[in-house]
Each structure stands twice: as structure tokens, then as C-alpha cells.
Image (cartoon, rainbow, N blue to C red):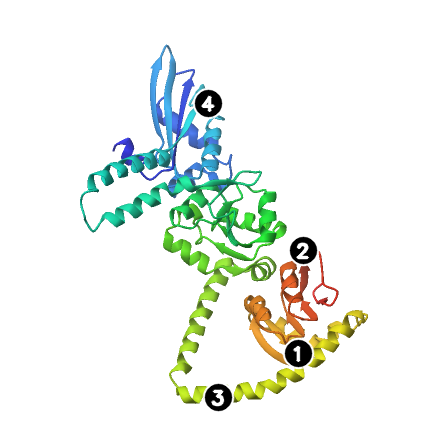
């Protein structure tokens, strides 16, 4: 097997040299590498587990002896990201004994295999296209698209004082996608998504926090434990709107275009993530699967009645409904104007939670997370899933109170303050720093 074939699926190759004060053989070196790094970096970076899952390739060792000493080289293929690869490389240098002899290992360099391949692809593609300039063949457009994918990495920019890796559309796009690392941004660029920016570490940069207050932010993290930790920190310090995750056990940097589109399409509102996952302890992917089942059910129900009623019946019913609703809307608007003048100056009633007790018990006993929308007379207007709450409030102007068994966030308060809602009743508050004077917040789990 050639080196080219062996390293064809790796991202990086670690090259190191060693010296042992005695005669040792290749198995002694390999045994020392696995034995002395075992448990050093935790389960996630255990060499044996990484090799079983294919994240680390076959470790090659070459040895030769001279004057009673053993010298040689070590080659470690890695498909981990650059940070994890660098950590493993540093771990090799902690080995101080091979077999019975004292030894010393020094890392010479880490080679980015993909950079070499990318350079070759670009140069070779230029040569191929030059040879096809005078020929009209159906595959020309396909070749052009492939070359464009290979060179999109050059579109990467550095954004903010921290020089964060980002796509070229981040400076002016209304919405951005926050990912974990540079490789994630490059993968999204390769598939034509140019509004991604990376946090580059576990500490969230100030640039990301500032952007989250100005843009619509979707977090897109890896489907592992590390991705969950970064997501938790983002939800605490930034104003996140939606949450998307890579498929379970996968990283964003290794996803195909189809997987990326599916993950972003299945994004979940941040409020629902805080409620369902961090407070109720549910698995993120169970929530996604439940959401997909509900979407499929809604689509089937939507299609069914369309084939039943005749167009004339629809028109007559719509006209009748419009005429019936018109006086109701007029009657509802006038009292609201009076309420907006009077209620803000009233002192909160000590028994406010009792006013909504019936609805609180109803949302607490519901099988799924629902929100109840009430009018001024405490009549139920609608019962909706919590994930649809923000959109429903933006569309409705007749909601007086909202009751739900979830977390009241600052973003929800900002949305509610623009719709005329007077009471927001939830289980608890989370990161609330400001509240409109005409909005009363009631919590029942504190």
C-alpha cells in the first residue's frame, strides 16, 4: 500500500522522530505510544478508541540502530480537526520510555494533507480547462462547478478584532450562522453557504455577542458533547434565535450538502431548546424527530380538506366569515385603547397567579409543550405548540395574556412588547435584563 493510498482519507499527518538509549524494536515503540498515552487525554482522545473508529490511521514506525542506540521516525495519520491533532502530537512528546530503554520523542511537523490536494486540484483543473477551451462538450459546465467548489476556500475572510474565520457575506447579511471552527466555515463555503462565522474556541468572542444583537442568529454545532457545551455557552451570553445541530455523532466540517440543508431546515427556536433540553432534560434529536413527525402530519391534514369543498363554497364561506368578524374586530379594538392607558399605572395584584391558575395547570399537565393565548376576558383564543409562539404573536393583535410551561427569555419579551400583550405567564425567567412598563411577567415555578 502506498503512502498516497494510506493517507487518502486523512486531513493531517503528524511526523515525529525518536531516540532510545538502547536496542528496541518497532512493536516496543508502538506499545509505548498506546500504553503511555492511555487515559492521558480522556476517552474522547484515547488512541485505541480513535483508531477503532477510523479517526486515527495506522501508525507507521521505522527504526534503525547505531552504537547501542535506536533511532527512528513515527508517522500518525489523523482525520481529527487541527486542534485535536495538535493535542495528540504534543502527547507523543510526553513518552519517556520505550521498552526497557529511556527515550525521547520530538514532533517535527504536522502536514495538512488537504492543502496539498487542494493546490493540486486547482492547478490541474486549470490545465484541463485550457485543453477544453476549443471543445463544446456537455461536461464543461459540470467541470466549472467542481472547480468553483475547490476554490471557494479562498473566499474565507477574517472578521472583527479577533479575526474570526467567516464567509464573505457575514459583514452585510441580515442573518448569520455561528459554527465552531474554521473547518466548519470552509465546508459551508464549499457548498455555497457564505454567511457563516466561527467562534474558534470554547470562549465566545465579543464580536459574536455583538452580532447576535443585530442579526438573526442560527447556531450550527457538532453533534457531539463538545457541540452541546458550546451551544450552552452561546445561549447564555448571546442572543440566539435558532439552534441547528449536525446529525448525531457527526461534525459540521464533514457533512455533505444534503445533510447541511436538512440540519438547517430542522432548526429549533432557541426558547424551545432552553425549555425542552436544558430544563426538561430531553435529547435534542428526539425533539427534531418529533418536529418532523408533526410537520408531516400537518402537511397531510392541510392537503385533505382542499379536495372536498368546491371553489364557490369556499368563496361564500370566506365572505360570510369576513362579514361576521368585522363587527367583532371593531368591538375588540376600542376597549384595548382604554386598557393601554389605565393598566400600566395600576399596582400588581397579589393574586395574579391565581387568576391564571386554571390555565397554568392545563399547560403543566399537557403531554407536549403548549402555549395558551387569552383575550381580555380570559377566554382561550388558541392553544399552540411553544415553538410557534413567536410567529403567532407577530401575526395576532388580539392577545391579552400568554400562558405556557416554559422559560421566559429576553427575546420573547422583546417580541411580546411589540404586540400589545399585557401578561406573560411562564415557569421561570432566564437572562431577563429589561421589561416594558406595560407588560406584567408572572412565574409559577420560582
333 or 201, which lies in front? Answer: 333
- Specify few, some or many for label 4: CA neighbours under 10 Å numbering under 14, 14-19, or 20 or more: some
Q: Earlier in the sequence, mark 2 or mark 4?
A: 4
Q: Confirm whether residue 219 shows in the render.
A: no
Nearer the observer: mark 2 or 1; the answer is 1
Determine whether the residue tagged by mark 4 lies in a helix, strand or loop.
strand
Asked if labels 4 and 2 touch by Cβ distance under 8 angstroms, the answer is: no
Residue 431's disc is 2
Residue 375's disc is 1
Nearer the observer: mark 1 or 3; the answer is 3
Q: Confirm whether residue 374 shows in the render.
A: yes
Nearer the observer: mark 2 or 3; the answer is 3
Asked if labels 1 and 2 touch by Cβ distance under 8 angstroms, the answer is: no
Q: Earlier in the sequence, mark 4 or mark 1?
A: 4
Nearer the observer: mark 4 or 3; the answer is 3
Nearer the observer: mark 4 or 1; the answer is 1
- Disc 2 to disc 4, C-alpha distance: 52 Å
Q: Residue at x 68, y 62 (%)?
A: 428
24 or 346, which lies in front? Answer: 346
Q: Quadrant of the C terminus?
A: bottom right
**Residue 304 screen position, x and y as percent:** 40, 80
- Residue closest to the far front: 134
71 or 387, which lies in front? Answer: 387
**Residue 199 screen position, x and y as percent:** 54, 44
- Disc 4 to disc 3, C-alpha distance: 86 Å
Q: Earlier in the sequence, mark 1 or mark 3?
A: 3
- Disc 2 to disc 3, C-alpha distance: 46 Å
Residue bearing mark 3: 317
Residue bearing mark 4: 97
Determine whether the residue tagged by mark 2 lies in a helix, strand or loop.
loop
Determine whether the residue tagged by mark 1 lies in a helix, strand or loop.
loop
418 or 368, which lies in front? Answer: 418
Amino acid at each position: 500500500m502506498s503512502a498516497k493510498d494510506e493517507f487518502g482519507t486523512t486531513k493531517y499527518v503528524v511526523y515525529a522522530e525518536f531516540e532510545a538509549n538502547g536496542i528496541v524494536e518497532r512493536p516496543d515503540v508502538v506499545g509505548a505510544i498506546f500504553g503511555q498515552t492511555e487515559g492521558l487525554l480522556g476517552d474522547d482522545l484515547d488512541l485505541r478508541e480513535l483508531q477503532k473508529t477510523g479517526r486515527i490511521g495506522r501508525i507507521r514506525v521505522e527504526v534503525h540502530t547505531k552504537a547501542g542506540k535506536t533511532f527512528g521516525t513515527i508517522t500518525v495519520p489523523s482525520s481529527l480537526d487541527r486542534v485535536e491533532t495538535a493535542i495528540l502530537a504534543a502527547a507523543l512528546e510526553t513518552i519517556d520510555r520505550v521498552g526497557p530503554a529511556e527515550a525521547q520523542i520530538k514532533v517535527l511537523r504536522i502536514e495538512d494533507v488537504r492543502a496539498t490536494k487542494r493546490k493540486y486540484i486547482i492547478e490541474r483543473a486549470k490545465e484541463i480547462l485550457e485543453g477544453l477551451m476549443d471543445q463544446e462538450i456537455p461536461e464543461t459546465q459540470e467541470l466549472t462547478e467542481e472547480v468553483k467548489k475547490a476554490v471557494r476556500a479562498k473566499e474565507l475572510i477574517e472578521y472583527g478584532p479577533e479575526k474570526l474565520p467567516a464567509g464573505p457575506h457575514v459583514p452585510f447579511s441580515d442573518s448569520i450562522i455561528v459554527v465552531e471552527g474554521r473547518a466548519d466555515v470552509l465546508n459551508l463555503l464549499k457548498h455555497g453557504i457564505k454567511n457563516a462565522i466561527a467562534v474558534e474556541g470554547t470562549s465566545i468572542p465579543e464580536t459574536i455577542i455583538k452580532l447576535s444583537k443585530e442579526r438573526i442568529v442560527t447556531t450550527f454545532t457538532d453533534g457531539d458533547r463538545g457541540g452541546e457545551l458550546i451551544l450552552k455557552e452561546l445561549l447564555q451570553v448571546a442572543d440566539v434565535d435558532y439552534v441547528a445541530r449536525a446529525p448525531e455523532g457527526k461534525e459540521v466540517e464533514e457533512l455533505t450538502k444534503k445533510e447541511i440543508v436538512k440540519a438547517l431546515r430542522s432548526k429549533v427556536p432557541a426558547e424551545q431548546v432552553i425549555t425542552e433540553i436544558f430544563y426538561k432534560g430531553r435529547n435534542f434529536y428526539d425533539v427534531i424527530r418529533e418536529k418532523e413527525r408533526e410537520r408531516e402530519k400537518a402537511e397531510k391534514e392541510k392537503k385533505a380538506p382542499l379536495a372536498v369543498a368546491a371553489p364557490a363554497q369556499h368563496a361564500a364561506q370566506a365572505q360570510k366569515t369576513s362579514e361576521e368578524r368585522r363587527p367583532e374586530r371593531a368591538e375588540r379594538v376600542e376597549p384595548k385603547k382604554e386598557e393601554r392607558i389605565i393598566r400600566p399605572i395600576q399596582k400588581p395584584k397579589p393574586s395574579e397567579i391565581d387568576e391564571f391558575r386554571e390555565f397554568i395547570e392545563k399547560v403543566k399537565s399537557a403531554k407536549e409543550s403548549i402555549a395558551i393565548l387569552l383575550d381580555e376576558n380570559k377566554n382561550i383564543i388558541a392553544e399552540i405548540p411553544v415553538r410557534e409562539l413567536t410567529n403567532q404573536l407577530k401575526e395576532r393583535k388580539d392577545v391579552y395574556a400568554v400562558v405556557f410551561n416554559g422559560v421566559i427569555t429576553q427575546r420573547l419579551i422583546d417580541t411580546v412588547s411589540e404586540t400589545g400583550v399585557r401578561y406573560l405567564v411562564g415557569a421561570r425567567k432566564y437572562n431577563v435584563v429589561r421589561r416594558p412598563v406595560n407588560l406584567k411577567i408572572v412565574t409559577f415555578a420560582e
